[in-house]
Amino acid sequence: MRGSECLSTGKSSDLQGMRYEVYELSKKEWLLYGAEGILGAAVLDYVFYRSIGLFLILMPMGLLFPLLLKKELKKRRLETLRGQFKDAILAVASGLNAGYSVENAFAVSLKEMEEIHGNDSMIVREIRLILQKVRMNLTFEEALGDFAERSGLDDVKNFADVFLAARKSGGELMKIIARTAEIIGEKIRIQEEILTATASRRMEQKIMSVIPVLIVIYIELTSPGFFGILYTTIGGRLLMTVCLGIYLMSCQLAKNFLEIGI
């Protein structure tokens, strides 16, 4: 995800930060995914219709393929941010348990995140921004709350809410924040384990989605004209349209079955 993270990070000023729920496609992504969309339209046209005219109609839709991917790309970015946030708050919790102040615990977390995720990772930029705002006399609550609001992640918002409540109520602030960080970090870790456990199933789903297309192409290459009647008669084209609908619906259903949330 490092490459995807560097792409389409959105527009933001130095102190405003990025809004992670708003995904802006870069020129590179428009070109890359637009080409993929055109290729996909060409393959579907060859398998189900064999019509140059229809392909010319589908081509503009292929160019819009990047827009269909925005939701998935945003989801991947949020998953990456969630994983990085887990590492960061566990490092903060470790620092607090060691007796550091909140600011020093975040500073230690920053150094660890630079080593783990790189200087230009999302979480490193956010921790730097938080510390920069604190040095400009903003409170930790305000700086962390701004990140939580922009992140689009419930885990970040929950941590910020507990942090704010703990600061207001006083008491064992360090223990409360450290324990909250550990609980949220454990929740995210479990989610990552589930995603890892289902990764092979998701790959199988992608392979199974491609197999019907490959079978048709293979038969056509080894036995030219075998499917000819399906592309030259009205009944054949109607049947292939139904097959296309069933194929697309089955692909979407398979994808939905593998969507697991916590």
Image (cartoon, rainbow, N blue to C red):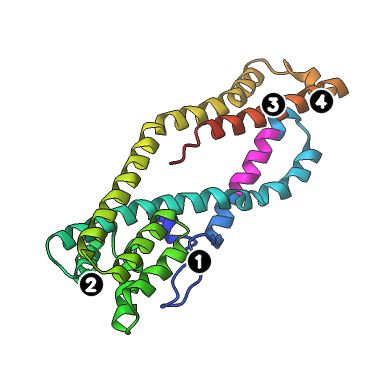
Q: Which residue is mark 4?
A: 237
Give the numbered dot on residue 254. Answer: none
> Could you tell me how far apart the alpha carbons at marks 1 and 2 are, in whole angstroms?
28 Å
Return the disc, 4 or 1, that comes first in the chain's sequence: 1
Q: Secondary structure at mark 2?
A: helix
Please determine whether, in this image, residue 16 is positioned above or below residue 114.
below
Question: Would you say 118 lies left or right of 239 here?
Answer: left
Residue 1 part of the magenta segment? no
Q: Secondary structure at mark 4?
A: helix
Q: Secondary structure at mark 1?
A: loop
Task: Residue 251: name its quadrant.
Answer: top right
Q: Secondary structure at mark 3?
A: helix
- Residue at the outermost right position: 234
> Could you tell me how far apart the alpha carbons at marks 3 and 2 are, in whole angstroms?
56 Å
User: What range is drawn magenta here?
Assistant: 35-44
> Which of these two is toward me, 44 or 251?
251
> Could you tell me how far apart the alpha carbons at marks 2 and 4 are, in whole angstroms?
67 Å
Q: Is residue 1 visible?
A: no
Residue 38 part of the magenta segment? yes
Return the disc, 1 or 2, that comes first in the chain's sequence: 1
Q: Which residue is mark 1?
A: 10
Q: Residue at x 63, y 45 (%)?
A: 37
The amino acid at mark 1 is Gly
Circles 3 and 2 in contact, beta carbons < 8 Å = no
- Image depth: mark 1 or mark 2 in front: 2
> Could you tell me how far apart the alpha carbons at marks 4 and 1 are, in whole angstroms?
44 Å
